[in-house]
Image: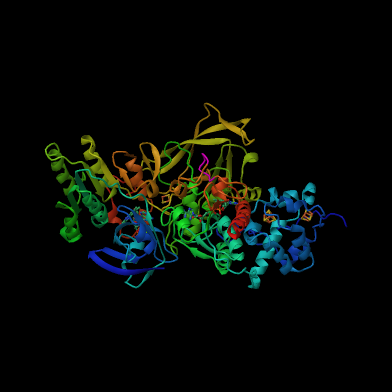
Amino acid sequence: KGRMNLNRVEMPKQEPEDRRRNFDEVATGYTYEMAMEEASRCIQCKKRNCQQGCPVNIDIPDFIKHLQDGNIEAASRVLKAKTSLPGICGRVCPQELQCENSCTLNKKGAPVAIGRLERFIADWERSQGAVSTPEIAPSTGKCVAVVGTGPSGLTVASDLAIRGHQVTMFEALHVAGGVLMYGIPEFRLPKEIVQREVQYVASLGVDIQLDTVIGINYSLDELLNTKYHAVYLATGAGLPQFLRVPGENLNMVYSANEFLTRTNLMKAYLYPEYATPVKMGKKVAVIGGGNVAMDSARCAVRLGAQEVYVVYRRTRQEMPARLEEVENAEEEGIHFHFLCNPTGFISDGRNNVSAMELIRMKLGEPDASGRRRPVPIEGSEYTMDVDTVIVSLGTSPNPLISSTTPDLETSRWGTVVTDERGKTSKARVWAGGDIVSGGATVISAMGEGRRAASAMHEFLSQ
Amino acid sequence: MFPIVAHEELAPKVHRMSVKAPIVAEKSKPGQFVILIVDEKGERVPFTISGWDASKGTVDFVYIEVGKTTCRLGSLKPGDQLAHFVGPLGKPAEIDHYGHVLAVASGYGASAILPVLKALKEKENRITTILQAPDRERAFGCAELEEVSDRLVLAIGTPGEDMTVSATRLLRKLLANHPQNPIHRVIVMGSLCLMRVISEMTRPYAIKTMVHLTPLMVDGTGMCGACRLSVKGNNRFACVHGPEFDGHEVDGWDVLMARRCTYADESVLQQSFQCRGCSQW
Ligand SMILES: Cc1cc2nc3c(=O)[nH]c(=O)nc-3n(C[C@H](O)[C@H](O)[C@H](O)COP(=O)(O)OP(=O)(O)OC[C@H]3O[C@@H](n4cnc5c(N)ncnc54)[C@H](O)[C@@H]3O)c2cc1C
Ligand SMILES: Cc1cc2nc3c(=O)[nH]c(=O)nc-3n(C[C@H](O)[C@H](O)[C@H](O)COP(=O)(O)OP(=O)(O)OC[C@H]3O[C@@H](n4cnc5c(N)ncnc54)[C@H](O)[C@@H]3O)c2cc1C
Ligand code: SF4
Ligand code: SF4
Ligand code: FES
Ligand SMILES: [Mg+2]
């Protein structure tokens, strides 16, 4: 083995000044040459540290080996054996905490850019037009309902369809894809890529019923008592949380869900070609420090806001957002205000928000999650002029299904309780993704789907 | 796709549309609504279900042309298709035997309230209905309202400065008679300001007054929070906890009205939406 090459190949990006004005993808992806150069840095460790860092256990050294040999098709097959959404995971996985964090080269500070390579392979396959569909097992005669078409539902649907079960997916919205469609913006994850994955799942024989709300059009029991031998619940965590401070319902105080849904799912950035409007002021405060806050702030910039502030009650170190996205946001001119928390919103006299009252915070003792708890500093109140606020505090599961299914055990946070393979308290019902975790990542939602699918397959094969 | 099976004009700029949507028709209850999208570039717009036929799989609603999407709807013909149609959304209206129910309807409410009144009639309530309309030409749906009401009173005229529309004058008289001819429940389906004014009028008499609120909505399933409003100090989502609320428990009407008109300036034919006291105008 030669010397370690510590020069990670950077991925080209749109210049901040340009990308502030468009919704096109920020990172434009590796060229063939770049991908080959980056792949050549992998030293093919025997211990496969990287693979253990991946929540779905992708055979990372193997796919990179195929890349090194110039066999992209074989690399793609290795990926597809463990993930049906490589083009998505390669873009939005928090790789710095997962596969790349565990890469041997990370000890020297320059892990192999596994995510970027994964993305390159998926994009290459797409550009070739030919998507290899796996062999589908003969029909088992068993029917499965999958509720919710986010990454967790899509994974279960494709896994079970390949094993010969007849799968129907139900989606409340008018488009399949879950948060991948309504939350994560186009400039991070082009919607065309998500729809291609959805079409791939449909091409396996999965029937996708849009505009259908389980808990309304069919109850969970109706599904179980009619056609379906088993049900997988993957309805995510779509219920927005609010600060519960005075003035929070004033005009131009958005929840991140409303703001992102208008902007991404309904394509308000293309208004009036698309009929849904989104109103954007000049001075915007985004409350929160996660990926949702970063996405909201970066959408606000692109919709023409002049100044955008991210207001977070802890410090940069505690921010749950991906580092890469924080850096992107900073490059795009977004300002960060740490250690402060809104205590109220003030009206302009016409019920539009015109200012925000805040209190400064300091970090106290660590809480249950190990993060130091923010505590208000008495007497440090101040105000800040804003004409738009986007509350991005996180979400919890929508109670629509649990409230219509009394025998489905839920936790006090509203999440559905399951065993380690996704089985719920209710016979023939499994669950996974954000409805179980309360809000995690695309890849963990997929991983839980994969485990549940194998458990469901065992059950259906009995 | 959801085919339009019938489409008729009830009054100038007022239409009834009937759409084939079996899974919606199957579960519809009085007071619920649908959200539809005209085409793939369309917005999600809510409409109250004014009737349904589960055996034919059809759902009806009545709409007024006020802006882009409703005008677009107005141009569609039977046989055309809507891209999306989801429902029934929201909680059904509360139905029980109350005694004497006073219903007040204006605008599309004249038709949207019909399923609620029919259900109340089945529970053997005595129903007095006031239909508020700006002029006779726009007082549509009288025949159907008459059928489900014991008494129908027309209140014709545009609101004055103090919002003393004919309906509120009539209501004042009825309330003056309240001890002799008690009203056990009031239901209002109309403009936000009419619902607000009537709630304030019945409050001193402690007559339970149900209003059907229409804040801006996007998803209609409790995901976006656009439709939130304050009820007895708690945040409620009109699309899942409503749209029917106790008008005496709704606080922050000013904010509710302001939020409803966030996009007012984007619209073409807004005048008909202008409420008294709405700060967005
Ligand atoms: C703005 C934003 C940015 C994010 N960024 C990242 C990131 O960069 N990287 C990352 O890994 N993760 C990110 N996440 C988290 C990630 O998107 C989620 O963890 C993941 O999407 C969860 O998948 P899921 O399948 O459980 O549910 P979801 O993706 O939430 O999908 C659930 C689906 O179920 C539907 N549904 C709900 N109720 C019903 C019902 N009753 N009947 C029928 N259908 C129903 C919903 O409409 C939705 O389509 C982000 C989340 C958000 C909101
Ligand atoms: C629960 C509910 C039930 C309704 N039932 C009916 C009905 O039976 N018949 C009827 O004619 N109208 C009904 N509406 C109002 C109807 O949704 C609006 O008139 C329609 O969206 C106007 O669209 P537009 O593009 O033509 O006009 P726009 O110019 O877009 O809007 C005109 C006005 O309509 C309201 N509006 C616009 N978009 C929305 C939206 N997404 N959600 C709610 N209100 C909006 C706003 O007040 C706006 O100022 C209902 C609204 C709600 C929330
Ligand atoms: S799926 Fe995510 S964690 Fe796994 S290898 Fe790919 S980028 Fe890394
Ligand atoms: S740990 Fe890093 S260097 Fe080693 S095989 Fe995995 S990707 Fe290659
Ligand atoms: S319309 Fe989105 S929560 Fe009610
Ligand atoms: Mg509109």
Q: State the extent of the magenta-drawn residues as a range.
A: A411-416
- In the figure, A340 relative to A61: above or below? above
- Outermost residue, top direction? A378
Q: Position of residue B231 (x, y in %)?
A: 36, 39
Q: Position of residue A58 (x, y in %)?
A: 71, 57
Instruction: Write down which quadrant ligand 3 falls in.
Output: bottom right
Q: Position of residue A373 (x, y in %)?
A: 60, 33
Q: Main secondary structure of the magenta part?
A: loop
- Is residue A247 visible to us here? yes
Observer-nearest residue: A397 or A456? A456
Q: Position of residue A102 (x, y in %)?
A: 75, 49
| Among the 4 quarters of the image, the one containing residue A57 | bottom right
Q: Describe residue A313's horizontal placement relative to residue A387 as left or right.
A: right
- Tell me the quadrant of the picture where the N terminus of chain B can be found: bottom left
Total marks drawn?
A: 0
Q: Describe residue B164's horizontal placement relative to residue A39 as left or right.
A: left
- Is residue A15 visible to us here? no
Observer-nearest residue: A120 or B265? A120
Q: Describe residue A445's horizontal placement relative to residue B97 as left or right.
A: right
Q: Describe residue A150's horizontal placement relative to residue A134 as left or right.
A: left
Protein image colouring: rainbow
Observer-nearest residue: B134 or A403? A403
Residue at the image point whose x is 54% and y is 63% from the top: A142
Q: Is residue B268 highlighted in magenta?
A: no
